[in-house]
Amino acid sequence: MPDATAATAHHAVTVHETPATRVLIGVGARQGVADEVVRLGAERVLLVSTPSADEAAGQIAAALGGRLAARFDRPAVHTPVAVTAEVMAGPGSGGVDAVIALGGGSAIGLGKAVAARTGIPQIAVPTTYSGSEVTPVLGETEDGVKTTRRDPALAPGTVVYDPELTLSMPAGLTRTSAMNALAHAVEALWAPDATAVSDALATEAVDGILTALPRVLAEPAAVPGRARLQSAAWLAGLCLAQTRMGLHHQLAHVLGGAFDLPHAELHTLLLAHVMAFDLPAAPAAAARLERVAGPDPVAVVGELARAHQGPTTLGALGVPRAELRGIAERVVARPYPNPRPLDVDSVAALLDAAW
Ligand code: NAD
């Protein structure tokens, strides 16, 4: 019979937090962005956007009219502190009272970085599947060092999902960005702080991504498939927001930082290797994955990754093989939860398989 002592020893209490977010979702939702600004009572808005969403940025700027105070359209990956400083010192940026971030994780990271320094509200309008728009997490780089912080105040208060904004994603970015989202959901399934809510979100996210991604790749201009994939990525982002990530995200963080690698491609090529490594030690996660992916989830994910028309191995990304052991040492030295206990030899072997 379970007793209270046993419960205490197993840290039975989990804390589940959901940042409060207002979400607009649907075809044409981007046309509601200016109204959201009015709703916030903002008068001087900073609009940061990715060059790939130039047209939508122009429409939003026009709808803002006199409320648009400043624009910036060169967000950089991993949110360099110098870029944030440049934006904040730019013409019109003084005294802005809201920020709109239109783009992938890089644009949204910049919006968060501005909000972190000013406390102003954010409206995030994602154009990829990175999920950053719903997380209270910000990774910033300075002098080549990436630091990550987590604070509920970093999560954008308003998120606008318009599937039409994802139509322009080329096949490569569609695949790798969706695999990045898949990784959030997979690691949530074996997280030590998983709950019934995160399990439900993660399972539906995996199902949605594995169902919709092949359809979108086959028919990239069809909006219903894009909408399903975007919704699944939303759920996956919530998984990232609500649970602690394990080995997969640590590997991506350390490798990405050490060799300045493309974020989504790196996630794509690593995921099946980490699943093969961890799933035998995570039977509940494996059972859920098998329910939605069939008897061999590792094969399904590996096949999606290997079909990428771009680098599909660490070697092809330019990581020197001789450096893998050093990476394994750094990944094992960091404290974080993982279903399978980590040692340098086994992590180095995983990396070698991905090389
Ligand atoms: P990205 O934002 O860097 O965009 C990649 C490229 O794709 C850019 O050139 C961009 O202009 C282009 N692009 C974006 N949307 C497009 C579209 N719809 N059509 C055509 N081109 C488009 O890539 P990303 O993978 O979305 O984001 C990666 C960044 O986000 C990294 O810095 C990563 O660390 C961060 N991230 C943060 C979190 C978090 O919770 N804080 C989560 C995931 C990723």
Image (cartoon, rainbow, N blue to C red):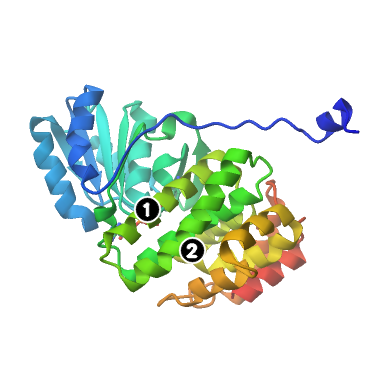
Residue occupying image coordinates x 60% and y 58%: 248
Image x and y of residue 100, in percent: 26, 38
Query: Quick one: SS at disc 1?
Result: helix
Give the residue type that dot 2 points to.
Leu
Query: Is residue 296 visible from the viewing direction of this image?
Result: yes
Image x and y of residue 57, in percent: 17, 47
Residue 76 falls left or right of residue 273: left
Total marks shown come to: 2
Residue at the spot of label 1: 230
Sequence order check, earlier mark of 2 and 1: 2
Q: Residues within 10 Å of mark 2 (few under 14, many from 20)?
A: many
Instruction: Kindly give the residue lying farthest to the top in the view shown.
Output: 41
Q: Quadrant of residue 214?
A: bottom left
**Ligand 1 in which quarter:** bottom left
Q: Is residue 1 above or below residue 334?
A: above
- Quadrant containing the C terminus is bottom right
Give the alpha-carbon distance from disc 2 to disc 1, as whole Å. Answer: 12 Å
Query: Is residue 263 visible from the viewing direction of this image?
Result: no
User: Any atom of ligand 1 within 8 Å of the CB at mark 1?
Assistant: no
Disc assigned to residue 287: none
Instruction: Kindly give the residue lying farthest to the right in the view shown.
Output: 1
- Mark 2 and mark 1 in contact? Answer it, CB < 8 Å: no
Image x and y of residue 36, in percent: 23, 31
Image x and y of residue 29, in percent: 23, 43
Residue at the spot of label 2: 210
Observer-nearest of 310 and 258: 310
Observer-nearest of 7 and 60: 7
